[in-house]
Structure formats: C-alpha cells, structure tokens
Amino acid sequence: MSKDTIPYKIYLEENEMPKAWYNLRADMINKPAPLIHPGTHQPMTLEDLSPVFCEELCKQELNNTDPFIEIPQEIRDFYKMYRPSPLVRAYCLEEKLGTPAKIYYKFEGNNTSGSHKLNSAIAQAYYAKQQGLKGVTTETGAGQWGTALSMACSYFDLDCKVYMVKVSYEQKPFRREVMRTYGASVTPSPSETTQIGKKILEEHPGTTGSLGCAISEAVEVATSTPGYRYVLGSVLNQVLLHQSIIGLETKAALDKYGIVPDMIIGCAGGGSNLGGLIAPFMGEKIKGNADYRIIAVEPASCPSFTRGRYAYDFADTGMVCPLAKMYTLGSGFIPAPNHAGGLRYHGMSPVLSQLYDDGLMEAIAVPQTEVFAAAEEFARVEGILPAPESSHAIKVALDEAKKCIETGEEKTIVFGLTGTGYFDMVAYEKYHDGIMDDYVPTDEELEKYFETLPPIE
C-alpha cells in the first residue's frame, strides 16, 4: 500500500479554495461496483449513460483513475461568491457542554440555496450549458437540491424542471417558492404528468412519495424531451466528486493550524455531503497515513446503512434507471414522511457503500425527536438554526463530546453542518408541540422490500 500523501495542496488557490476536485475512487483499493444496464445487466458505458446525463458528467461518473479533476474557471469564479466556506470552532458549545473535546463544524449554509448542494448544481448546470442543452430535469426531497439547481440554471439561462417529493412539497412551500423565483417549474411527485407517476399513484393511492418516485419521473421527462438531460443531487460518483471541495477546504484549514481530527461525522441520505466531507481524510486512511474515525449518521426511519442489504438495486422506484450496488432498503421502499426530507432515499452512494462494506467507516441510525433535541441544543448556543438533515450529524457529535466529559479525553471532532433550517419551521413546530413521532420500520416491513431486489450478484 502506498504511503504517499495526497498532493491536494498544489491544487489550492491563494485563498485556499480548491482548483481541482478530488476523485477518491482513484485511491480506493476496492473500487465501487459499476452501474449496470437494467436491460442487459452489463456495466454501463459512456454510450449508455449519454442519453440520460450530460456527456462530460458521464465521463466523470466512469472515471476511476484520475485522482484530481480540474475545476473549470467559470465554476471556480461562481464558487468565489460563497467559498471557501467557514470552518468554525464551536467554542460556545464546548463551554456549555463542559467538555474537553474540541468541536469544529464546516458550515455550508452561507449561500442562497442554504446548503452544500450548490457545489454540484453549478457544475452540472455548467456542463449542460457547455453541451448546448435547453434544460435539465431533476428530483428534490427537502428542497435544498431543487433550490440549488434552480439557482444554477438561472445563472446559465437553462430551463429547470423539478419533481419534488409530495410530502416535502406540502411541508415546505417556501422552498418551492424559492425554486419558482429562480424560474424553475416544480411538480409534486408522484404526479399525473408522467406515465411512471400515474402507475405509482395507481399502485399506491395517496402516497406521500419518495426520492425514488421523483427520480423516475424526472428521468422519464428528460429522456422524452429533446434538448434535456437529467441531473441528480446525490448518490452518483460525479456528485461526490464535486462535493469533495468541502473536505478539501476542511483539511486545508485544519492543516494550516496543525489540527488532526479524531473523528469526522456527517449525515447520510444518498451520500453527497458525507462523501464530500470525508474524501481527503478517507484518502489518507486508505493510504495508511492516518486512522480517522469516520461516522455516517442516518435517520432510523430510513436506515440504509444500518439495516439495508448490500446488493444491486434500482436507483428509482419506477425501475428505469441503472442498477447500482449499494446498501439499500429496496427501490420500492417509501419512507415515513419524516422531516429530514433530504435523507429519505432508499439507497446509499456506491462509493460510500463500498467503503462501509470494507470496514473503513461506521454508521449510526438515530430517531427523529432526538435529532431535533440536538438541533435545538446547538441553535441555542451557536446561533445557527440547522437543517434537520445536518442535525443528525450534530446529534452524534454532541453524544461524542459528552462521552469525553466522562472519560476526560480531549478528542477533536469535526462534523458537517450542511445547511440552515429556516425553511423547516413546520418540523420545528411539530417538535415543540410534542406531536413529532419516531417511526421506525419493522423487520417484517423491510423484508418485503428485500424480497424484490433484483437477483444480480
């Protein structure tokens, strides 16, 4: 195993913003399993992916060899509006807890979309524009990705069609209106506007929807509308690549002050922010240069890592997308309508799934009410109202800091604060009113979805 360090510093600008994304797959010993064609069950090729995704993004999706991929200047210029994003030492939180732990968080909410999602949205919109496309389609759960993409498409004068998970469409009307402000059309999913949407509604009348449903609808529209392609906000290799800017900036800031974290914690839904945050740290761990404890935190209501199966599965409910080998609850799984909408996806990134299966990271599932209790504890001290998704990472970071009180250990904890929760006040209201529940699927419920997994090794 190579002991070479990752030469990320040569790819930093003077302001310490990366000039290249870090492709963790190039340094992985066990590469993530390839996407396979739903019809032939053969690995997807550039030709297979191109009718669905932008061509340059297809190349990035399939690239397992180049550790660094240069960020085009136009994207870097856009990034400078809000990057580098701050890495904050939570002094007030440490004092309030009375912990010897040192707590840092990388804050990605300092842009109009209110989350990390803009890092990939602007890249995907850029490549769509470069290809001469008219527009793009996508799905969104809580709305952060749809908000980010609508902003990016507005910047590049592209049409943007968003299919928003129905429960989030109803719970988070302000997210919807931000998207419309940027010129996007927003449709609650599943809908009557697509053949797949009609089929899902027929089979599951009254369903609150899922990211898998919304993906199916967005792909159908993209592949049937000339001049359009589909773009995705998480899960895919290309998205984790773009989000590596989070981890690269975090590592640069820590290295500048000689700080070595003991653990890196991130919330996990499809894997975009977690994969981006941990990328350079995981690269060091793989090369044997460090042994960070890396923790993925997911909702107990949608426990892909902790209770899922590592198997090939469809990325969408309509079963029209490529199959990915990932930790999955089954493509037909429709999560409970909890308030961490961005984490309500049935599967996990193939990259993160491989790392987890290799024992290079761990996962914890936490219940919803404990997550909001942690969010409130953090907000009252640090002055930022966190998104429900981010609050999963906060919950475990607080738990680890409190353990240090008992042991006296001075652990250094880094977690990802992926965005703000100012559009999530319905969720906070339900928590404060005591009507938020902690639904957790039973083994019997999950088993019926596992039985539908494709019989592919």
Image (cartoon, rainbow, N blue to C red):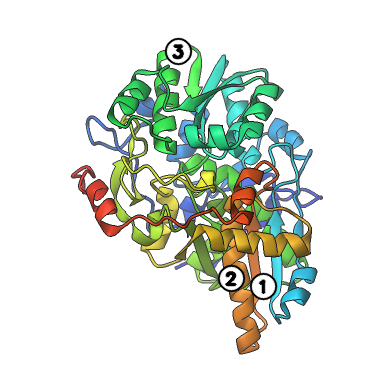
Q: Position of residue 392 (x, y in %)?
A: 56, 59
Name the residue tied to disc 2: 263
Residue 415 horizontal/vertical position (percent): 63, 62
**Residue 101 shows up from this direction:** yes
Q: Is residue 327 left or right of residue 156?
A: left
Per the image, label 1 sits on a secondary structure element best described as loop
Q: Residue at x 59, y 74 (%)?
A: 400
Crowd rating for badge 2 (residues with CA inside 10 Å; few <14, some 14–19, many 20+): some
Amino acid type indicated by mark 1: Val
The residue identified by callout 1 is: 260
Tag 2: residue type?
Met
Q: CA distance from mark 2 to mark 3?
A: 46 Å
Q: Residue at x 25, y 36 (%)?
A: 42
Return the disc, 1 or 3, that comes first in the chain's sequence. 3
Looking at the picture, how far across and down is residue 122, in whole percent? 64, 32
Q: Look at 34% across and 59% down and name the residue there.
A: 307
- Report the amino acid beneath label 3: Thr
Mark 2 secondary-structure assignment: strand
Which residue is disc 3 drawn over? 225
Give the side of residue 371 with respect to residue 39, left or right. right
Label 1–label 3 contact, CB within 8 A: no
Query: Residue 161 versus residue 351: which sits nearer the camera?
Result: 161
* Quadrant holding the N terminus: bottom left
Q: Nearer the viewer, residue 97 or 145?
A: 97
> Residue 32: which disc?
none
**What percent of the width, then of the height, locates residue 237?**
47, 43
Which quadrant of the structure image shows residue 306? bottom left
Q: Residues within 10 Å of mark 3 (few under 14, many from 20)?
A: some
Against 5, residue 124 (above or below) is: above
Element type at mark 3: loop
Q: Real-space Cα distance between discs 2 and 1?
A: 9 Å
